[in-house]
Each structure stands twice: as structure tokens, then as C-alpha cells.
Image (cartoon, rainbow, N blue to C red):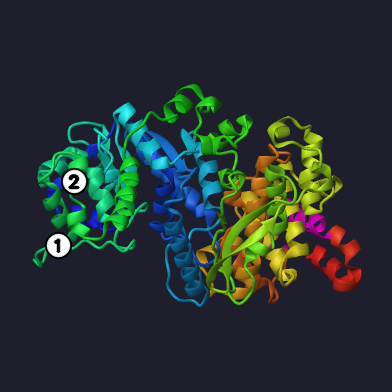
Amino acid sequence: MGIQGLARFIDDHGAILTDDQFRNSKLVIDGTYLYHFLYFNSSVDQQHGGDYDDFEDQVCKFFKALRDCGIEPYVIIHGGSDFSDKKFETQLHHVQSRINTANSLSKGLRGSGLLPILIKQVFKQVLSSLKVPFAQCIFEADQEIASLAERWNCPVLSNNSDFYIFDIQAGYLPFSHFKWQNASTQRGSSQRYIPCKRYTTTSFCRYFNINRQLLPVFAAIAGNDYVNLNKMGFPIRWEDKLPMEPNRRLLDWLARFQEQQEALDSVPSLIGHGKNNMDSALQALSLSIETYQLQPGCLERFFIKDKAPDPSHLPDHLSVLPDWTLLPLMKGTLSSSIIHILQLRPVIQGVQVEDPSLPSGNNTSRPIRQVVFGLLLGERREVEEYDREGINLTSSMVKAILPTAAQQMQLDMLNQAPHAVRLEVFLETLGVSQSTLNGIPPHLGLPVAVTYYWLRHAHLRPDRPFLQALLLGLVYGELCRQRKMLERLRRLIQRGASNLDKGVAHAYSQWQRCMRDCLDLNQLLCFPLPEPQIAWLYRGTLVHQLVDELRGVVTPDSLLMEDPSSGQLYRAIIYISLKKIRKRRRNELGLKFIEIIIKG
């Protein structure tokens, strides 16, 4: 997002950026762009639903490089959004683009730009484990990031071209020039640094001889996520026909002005429309310019005092948030999606590689989201959801529901409800009894409950190899957490990704969506079950290959024979996952078939 073409334009004018040896400084990091950057620039698999452990490894390496250079990172993750929804059409466009990418990947074609749907949760967990300070912003994040950097006199690290416009004295470090993997030692010293390029508005304005106050006007007229004059039907009409790069021509035009209002008053000469239409264009430009004005933020208070914003100081559109939710939202232990839901705004579902001829995998977990909607809004309310139908983005209204155990719960007091009640609501939503999870390590209780739900609700019921492969992957992740390794499974990983089977992809897409929505529900209920380490629950390339192996002559026992405890854990989990279904679906599945699964 940001100002289209501006990053390339600045790169083409190389004198604007200065070489820097960055070290011994605070650094405010745009966390959303960071996890995009690390995932897409490390060749992590995009076709099989995510190799989260590989991504975790990249995140760890990145922050080690910073700390080796004396850099103190502060990560800001986008959470809230602009209440006027000026970016909404842009968001819909990007989602449709991701649907098209997922469709290409499902056919074995090339594609990029598709993040696994659990990546944000994994990123926050890794930051916590590394003790990297981070905040999930409940306001529009760009302004908060720029405000904090200006307050602390340190640069911003991002890939968002809007940061070329914010007047941050310490500057902006574009990810594309931040060579963290090439950290070097300063000659004659043991001090390490990261080679990068630094941008400042001073350098930009000196190069193009314009007043820095005009940078927001430049961004608004050039077109950003908030306003695009050309798409609004107001194309710029230059009097001459000289061939010149559009941004350079616009900057030359702005150089004649000293004040913002003076430039805005001259905009009609550029677009030449009638007065009525002109008023709407000028109003849109003025609103866009306001987004680049630095205001006192709430992040410094959070990082220094571990306190959320004062509820009495919240803007009107955030007054729907109960006081108790503010700190968990900023700590990232509560999904930012609740902000949209409480404001009765549309919710856009994530995109994964799956079979586009089948219903979206999000349908499988919809009953879980309906309970989230019910806890937030009460019963009989509706939320508009955007999701794919085929390969097209469509919207539908989804009703909120409340399970029996939640009928007396009040959102404002939800955090004070007894643990037993919150646990009952969670388990009732998934159709799992508490006794079902007996014998399972506590941190695996939630994944097992999700798997149990998935087996009963998945479109096209998962067969034996699907379930076995999924749980073998879970056991493998558990052993990796214990620093153990099963050579036969590791050899499958080293073999590389298999050709995509759309049926397998669709089944595991549904499982991940169930996991995502259960994580949100568990957080909203203030963690009645321990949250698992997601990076170790699912490795897409491994479980896809395991399905192929298990469809042949390979058995789970043969893959786990190196470690007896892993076989015991596998059998306990698969028994728990199926024992209730065995009672309810004897005729459908057959008791003998289930016993074969349990035995592996």
C-alpha cells in the first residue's frame, strides 16, 4: 500500500537516499510489513498452506542481527483501521488479487504474495518468545508509527511509501535497502552495523526544491490508499504535452507554492471540472492530507508504562470497545478483528490455496465465528463477511449465535466470568466434552479439540491418511520443540514439496481456518485453554507428503519407531480425536475402520 510508484521513483533518483551504517539506536518497525517481507523474501513455501517453523527461524535470525548491532527494535503491528473506510475499496482489490493468486497456485502455476492465514498469530508468538517489544495498534497504524519515531528521534523501518511523506526527523529506512543479512564489522572496531539507505524529507525537499509542508499535498494528488483523483474521474490535465515522469512533473508544479492551501487552491487548474465536482475532489484531497499530520500517540505510554490508552480519550468510533479489551488488544493477545465486528463493519476472510470448485474453507469454521459474533454483539445480530465464491469475492450476512453456556454472559464483564464457564462455552462451541481431552498435554488440548471439530464439519470428510498425516505433523512439531528429531520425517522435509493435490490442500485449509477462529474465540474468552505454539502445529510441505506416503504402504508406526514416546502421543491424540465420533457415527464410518485408524 501507499503511493503507487513512489518507491521506484525515489530509487531512480539515487541522490535522495544516503548510505548508512545503522547501529546503536532504537528502531520503530512496521511489523505488518516485516512479516510480509520475511516470508516472501526467504523462499518459504506458499503453495501448501505454510511452513511456519521456517518462518519462525527467519524471524529469529532477523532480530538476532539487530541485537548484534546494538539496535533496540519496537514492533508495531497493524490492528485498527481508519473508521471512514477510505481504504476499504483498496483492501477488496487486494483480496481479489490474492484469490486469483491462490487459484493459480492450486493449478500448479506460479504465484506470489499469498500469506498463510496463521502467519500473524505465529509472528506475535515469536516476538513474545524473543522478548521483542511489540504493540498491536488499535488506531490507524501509520500515524502511530511515525509519531513514535518522531518522539524518540529514531527512524522507521518499513516498505510503505507513505513513510516518504511523514516528516520524521531521523528518517525512514526502506526494507528493500536494509541488508540485515549482510551485517558487517566497522573497520578498526568490533562494532557491527547493518548496511542500509536512509531517507529524510529534508533530502527529498532539497533535491526537488519544494517546501516540506507540500509533501502531503503531493501524496494526495499523486494518489494513495485514501484518494485517487484519476479513479474518481478527475485526471490531471497538463497544458503541455512534454514527456516527463508524472511524479517529477507534479513536483515541479508544486515547487511554485509555499503553503498547502495555496497549492490546493490551484488544483482546479490541473483537473478542470465543474464547481460541484471540484468540491468533492478538494474535500477528498484535504482528508488525505490530514492523514500525514503527526499527532500525539499512545504507543510511548504503552511501551514505557504497559498501559492502554485512557478510555475517556478514545475517539468516538472506538467507544464500542469495553475497557478491559484495550490492553489485550495492544498486547496482541486479543484479535483486532473484534474492532470491526463491534463497529458492525464488514469482515474480510483470509485466502488460502484450496479447490476453487468447492465452497470456501471458511464455511467450515463459520459456526465458531458465529459464537464470536454472539459474544460481541448478542444474538440475532448480523455481520457482513466477504469471502470467495468460486474465484470471485462476494459478501453475505452471517448471524450471531450464543451457545447455552453463554446465555448469561455480558461482554463488559466477560473477563470476570469464572474459568469453568468460559471453558464450557469454548468446548460447547466445538462440541467437545472436557473429559475428551483427558490424557492430552494441556498445550495440545486446543489443537486436538480443533481437529475433533474439523473431522465432524469439514466439507468432504477427511479420510484416514488425512488425519494420520495431520497428527504426525503435530507430533513432529512437538518433538522439535523438545529438540528431538525423527530422521524419516526429516528426510521427507529435505526432499522438498510434492506436487499439489487440491483435495489435500482443501482439507487442510479448512483445518487451519478452524484453528484460526478457535484461537480468536479462545482469546476472547480470556484463554480457557492454553494457547499452543502455532509454529510447531502445522508444516504444509510435510503433511502433504505424508498423505502420499500413508496412501501407500507406509504406516504411522513405521515413521515413529525411532522414538517410543512419539508413538504413544500419536495414538493418544488420534484416539481422543475419534472416540466420540465412533459412538455417534458407527453406521457412517464403521467401527472396524476406526479401530484400524487408532492402531495406525
Residue 597, given in percent of the width and then of the height, sits at: 80, 67
- Is residue 251 magenta-colored? no
Q: Which residues are magenta?
A: 557-578
Residue 203, given in percent of the width and then of the height, sits at: 15, 41
Q: Nearer the viewer, residue 423 or 213?
A: 213
> What's the residue at 67%, 41% (across, down)?
524
Residue 255, given in percent of the width and then of the height, sits at: 11, 46
Residue type at mark 1: give it: Trp
Residue to which mark 1 is pinned: 238
The secondary structure making up most of the magenta span is helix
**Mark 2 residue element:** helix
Q: Is residue 1 left or right of residue 239?
A: right
> What's the residue at 67%, 58% (across, down)?
398
Residue 537, given in percent of the width and then of the height, sits at: 62, 53
Residue to which mark 2 is pinned: 263
Q: How many marks?
A: 2
Measure the alpha-carbon separation of dots 1 and 2. Answer: 15 Å
Q: Residues within 10 Å of mark 2 (few under 14, many from 20)?
A: some
Residue type at mark 2: give it: Ala
The quarter of the picture where residue 228 lies is bottom left
Q: Nearer the viewer, residue 221 or 123?
A: 221
Q: Is residue 315 left or right of residue 243?
A: right
Q: Residue furthest top?
A: 305
